[in-house]
Amino acid sequence: QKEVEQDPGPLSVPEGAIVSLNCTYSNSAFQYFMWYRQYSRKGPELLMYTYSSGNKEDGRFTAQVDKSSKYISLFIRDSQPSDSATYLCAMSDSNYQLIWGAGTKLIIKP
Amino acid sequence: SQTIHQWPATLVQPVGSPLSLECTVEGTSNPNLYWYRQAAGRGLQLLFYSVGIGQISSEVPQNLSASRPQDRQFILSSKKLLLSDSGFYLCAWSVYNQPQHFGDGTRLSIL
C-alpha cells in the first residue's frame, strides 16, 4: 500500500462546476498538507498549505483535512478552463520531507 | 521576492554522455534545496536534498550525484547517462518548515 493514494483521473467536468479532488494516506504522523497545481511542462505551483485538521479557503479554492479519516480534499468552485491541470497532493510529518500523491489530471470543458 | 531558476528547459543527450543541470535560488539565504524526478503521469521522486553548502543527502541509489558549491546553487550531475535517466527533473527550495517551491524543470531525453 502506498503512503499516499490519489486517483490519477482524468477528471472531466463542465465549466462552472464544483470540483472535488481527494487524497488518502496511511501515516497518522502526517501533519502538514499541501496541494500543488502543475501545468504541462511546468513545475508544480503551491496552491494551498494547511497544518493539522480543518478547512482553509483562498478565493475559489478550499482545502479540507480530516485526520481522523486520513483524508484530504481540494474543492474548486466556479471552475474555469484555466484550472485544467494536474493537481498533486503532498504531506509530511515533522521532518518536512514530502510524500507525494501521483496527481489527478483535471480537464474543465468550456 | 524569492525566485528559482533552472536550466536548460529541454535537453537531449546520447547514452553514456555526462550531465550537468543547474539550479539557483534568489531572494533567500540558507534554503533547503531539492532535486526531484517526475516520470510521465506519476508523482515526484525525491533524488537529493541539501540543508547547507556541501551537505547532500541521497534518497535513491543511482548513477546521479548532486553538489551544492554555493549557498543558493544546486547541481545535478552524471558521468555516464543511462536510458533510464530520461525524465522531468525539478529543483525546489524551502526554508524552515514552509512548503517547497519549484522551478520550471528540465525535460531530459536520452537517445
Image (cartoon, coloured by chain):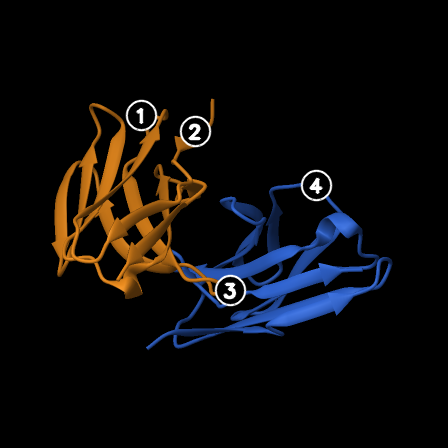
Neighbour class for label 2 at 10 Å: few (<14), some, many (≥20)? few
Mark whose residue sits in front, 3 or 4? 3
The label shown at residue A41 is 3
Q: Looking at the image, which residue sits at the far right? A: B16
Chain letter corresponding to the colour blue: B
Residue drawn at (81%, 64%), measured in percent from left and top? B18
Residue designated by label 4: B61
Q: Are marks 3 and 4 on the same chain?
A: no
Inspect the image, locate mark 3, and give the three-letter code of the amino acid beneath it: Arg
Give percent across and percent down for residue B99: 34, 54
Q: Secondary structure at mark 2?
A: loop
The chain containing the residue under callout 2 comes to: A
Which residue does the numbered mark 2 point to in the structure image? Answer: A3
Chain A colour in the picture: orange
Residues marked 2 and 1 touching at CB (< 8 Å): no
**Residue displayed at 80% across by 56% down:** B81
Q: Write down the quadrant of residue A100 in the picture.
A: top left
